[in-house]
Amino acid sequence: MPFIHEDFLLSNPTARKLYHNYAEPEPILDYHCHLPPQDIAGNRRFANLFEIWLEGDHYKWRAMRANGVEERYCTGDASPLDKFKAWARTVPNTLRNPLYHWTHLELKRYFGIEELLHEGNAESVWDRANEQLAGEGLRTNGILAKFRVKAVCTTDDPTDDLSHHRTIAASGLATRVYPAYRPDKALNVHLPEAFNPWVDRLAVASGIEITGLKTFQDALRQRHDFFHEMGGRLSDHGLDHCFADFCPESTAAGIFSKARTGQAATMDERGQFASYLMLFFGHLDAGKGWTKQLHLGALRGVNTRMLRQAGPDTGFDSIGDWSHASALGAYLNKLEEENALPKTILYNNNPIDNYTLATMIGNFQDGKTAGKMQFGSGWWYLDQKEAMEWQMNALSNTGLLSRFVGMLTDSRSFMSYPRHEYFRRVLCNMIGRDMEAGELPDSVEMVGGMIRNICYANARDYLRLAL
């Protein structure tokens, strides 16, 4: 039997029924990812297995470094084939790391390759995969069709003109591709050397001369309006921690003006300014019925020497240990008081925060929108079997798993769609185990309906995208 077989990760008969009858048939709604829209617009053809599989994959790079692989084979100048061979040498050493599961799921689902990858078969795998990549079926649009992806929400800066999204929308592609508004750079008043060029780009994109805080907000609002016109219905914020040091408009205006003259805001001032803007963004989202996503707790760029050498998002980030409860509660409560709390999905990067976030959402359910506040799926270091179960257990024990909007890829790679399958298998195995233990009713039809909804329908109904 091959390692990846039809009942992979499904350890009991009930789990198998749930997966094959209720989870497997559902399409995919990938409502948060970092896929490059230009690749979809151009229906990119990948030249080789490195381009589609290793290019930009910091998960693999971290494993390769831990295996003693030199940086030139990760982010450096080694040839694509040599980089792939270095990854193949690493794979047998990733046992019990989710990368081992993902690697072999991806090889089978994309290329029909069932053998275990190692140094000895690397060139053979390379040649067979590259032969298939030369065809139409594994160009970007073929991949979206193959995995029955109904919609993709990319992650986009407010200064982006969304020209690639226009091209996609006009192309007739069956998969709908929508932008998501990610205004993180608007908070960087403590880094004027980066903040001011970004504000200048925002002025150009919006067509608004930015002379102070008010026109800055006008420009951000104009871009939010534009994203809405382009079908966007989600925002996203990547924050190390939530901000709740609220200040009056006059204080925020002074901090903005100071940054525009090239003076870096202090950390206290940055906290005040970020708190002010996050309330503003909350009002924008609530006003249009959008969903806000808060990604909390990543400690980024820890190895500064390698950050300078390789750049951001290259594998030198880890789990942070901020305390989230007080500030997050205060932020959500402030929006609630102002009648401006949008639908919100909270994601944590530290498992210690599972029950904090799972119970926080219960404070702000409104009794009108089912699952208005969501505890999001396992993110980054938590998007693997054990941590997915932790997240779903915390949600089950304190809220309603039945209203959960399920999995997303959060990936830059077009090879990541089997992560939805992986999640669905983990979900069905966990629920099937409970059923066989007598902890849930012995009704596959009833429980299967919940499984089906978590896999697709809950997200479809919650996000209200045009599908």
Image (tube, rainbow, N blue to C red):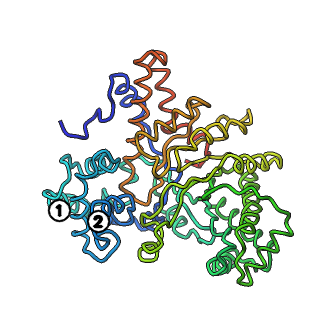
**Horizontal relation, residue 76 to residue 111: left or right:** right
For the residues labelled 2 and 1, the Cα–Cα distance comes to: 12 Å
Which residue occupies the foreground of this view, 142 or 6? Answer: 6
Label 1 crowding class (10 Å Cα cut-off): few <14, some 14-19, many 20+?
few
**Horizontal relation, residue 222 to residue 235: left or right:** right
Which residue occupies the foreground of this view, 76 or 205? Answer: 76
Camera-near label (2 vs 1) is 2
Residue 166 x %, y %: 55, 66
Residue 131 x %, y %: 20, 61
Question: Number of numbered discs present?
Answer: 2
The label number, if any, that marks residue 127 in the structure image: 1
Residue 333 x %, y %: 77, 46
Circle 2 is placed at which residue position?
Answer: 50
Q: Please tell me whether mark 2 sits on a helix, a strand or a loop.
A: helix
Q: Earlier in the sequence, mark 2 or mark 1?
A: 2
| Residue type of the residue flagged with mark 2 | Phe
Q: Please tell me whether mark 1 sits on a helix, a strand or a loop.
A: helix
The label number, if any, that marks residue 325 in the structure image: none
| Residue type of the residue flagged with mark 1 | Asp
